[in-house]
Structures are given as C-alpha cells and as structure tokens.
Image (cartoon, rainbow, N blue to C red):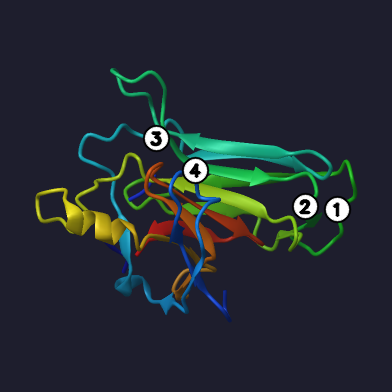
Amino acid sequence: MIRPSLAVAVLVAALVACADGPTSPAAGPVVPSFDLRDEADLHFLQPAPDAPALAQTSVSFYAVRGQDREAFIWYHKRPDARDSTKLARFKVPKSSLIRDEKGKPIAVGDSLLIKMSVPDSSLQIVNLEPAGLQFAADKPAKLTLWYLEADHDFNEDGVINKADRTIEASFQIWKQEKANDPWESLLCRLSTVNDQVEADIAGFTRYAVSY
C-alpha cells in the first residue's frame, strides 16, 4: 500500500533525480540517479491540516497539433488570499502531439481529448489519460506539480525546520504505469522557492511528488 506519510500540490533505463533550482524548475543542474521503488518504500505528500479543498478533481481539454494548450487543477481560494493556488499544470506545446493512443499519427490541426484527474486528494496522485498517447521526444509535454498546500512538516515531528528542508531537497516526480507496478523517478526540476517540481512527459500514466 502507498504510505501516505507526506503531499502535494501526481526511465526504465537511466532515471534522474530533481535538482533544486534557485527560482524556477528550469534552473539548476541535473543530478543523476537510478531509482525504482515499490509503493511501500515511497513517502507521498499529504495536504496541510488547513489546506483548502481542490476546486476540481478532474479537468479535460483538447490538445491540438500546431497549437500550445494547457490545463490546470486548482485549489479553492483561501478567504484571506488574493488568488487560488495550483496543484497541477499539464502543458502540450504545439509540436508535441505526434501519435494518438492507438499509435496513429496526428496531423496538424487535429485534436485529441486529454483528461487530468486526482482520484484521491489526500495522496495528490495525478492521472493523465488516454494511456498510450505519445509526444515528440524533442518537444515533450510538461507536467508541473505544486506542493504549496502540502503539510511542510515532512518528517512529522511536530516542527518545521532544517530537517524538513533537507527532505524537501530530495523531492522528485515519480510515475507508475499501472497499479502494483514499481514507481519510477523522472528527470525533473525542483524549485523549493516556488514549491514546485516540473518534468518532461513522453506518455500517460499516474504521477506524484514523493521521496
């Protein structure tokens, strides 16, 4: 079973860990790592006790070859906040979409319905559908996950301190192809300043921030 000790905001050969960038996930070096873990060996983030509920747990949009498209999953706005916070963004650049879930090439101007969902908001695992969809290797889709609304007492000792920041520096985006499969780490970028992690996405499955 997933060990929900901690949240968010959701490769077979060389797996790469996140590197902490100073201001954005596009900054900073990449630290190589080879990691493949069972669910029981991962620590998934949990929402903070006062975190707002997700405004939606599912969003669908049409990706169109030749157009930039993106979708977000948001939290409800806090009463004292100027704006809502985000859990996830999925961005499909205009040259990214190449084949549908059946392997059929997608022509310029053609569209395909994409669904992003969070079946269990207490674990913040993000599902992307349809399975089998392929993106261009040189123009991949991008998934950004935020953990602004996570409980930042990551080691659950009752205080938020340097020990938690050390844990945060090890955050990665992990993917699982299907239930009971091991989880695999992705090449990604971590910004502890912005509480976000970003990874390039070649295909669809389920994703989560964990360590």
Mark toward the start of the polypeptide (2 vs 4) = 4
| Total marks placed | 4
- Which amino acid type is shown beneath numbered disc 1? Ile
Mark 4 against mark 3, which lies toward the viewer? 4
Query: Label 4, on which residue?
Result: 88
Mark 3 against mark 2, which lies toward the viewer? 2
- Which amino acid type is shown beneath numbered disc 4? Ala
Mark toward the start of the polypeptide (1 vs 3) = 3
Neighbours of disc 4 within 10 Å: few (<14), some (14-19), many (20+): many
* CA distance for labels 4 and 3: 11 Å
- Across and down, in percent, residue 179 comes to 47, 69
Q: Residue at x 70, y 38 (%)?
A: 69
Asked whether disc 2 touches disc 1, contact meaning CB atoms under 8 Å apart, the reply is yes
Asked whether disc 3 touches disc 2, contact meaning CB atoms under 8 Å apart, the reply is no
* CA distance for labels 1 and 3: 33 Å
Position of 72 relative to 183 (above/below): above
- Which amino acid type is shown beneath numbered disc 3? Leu
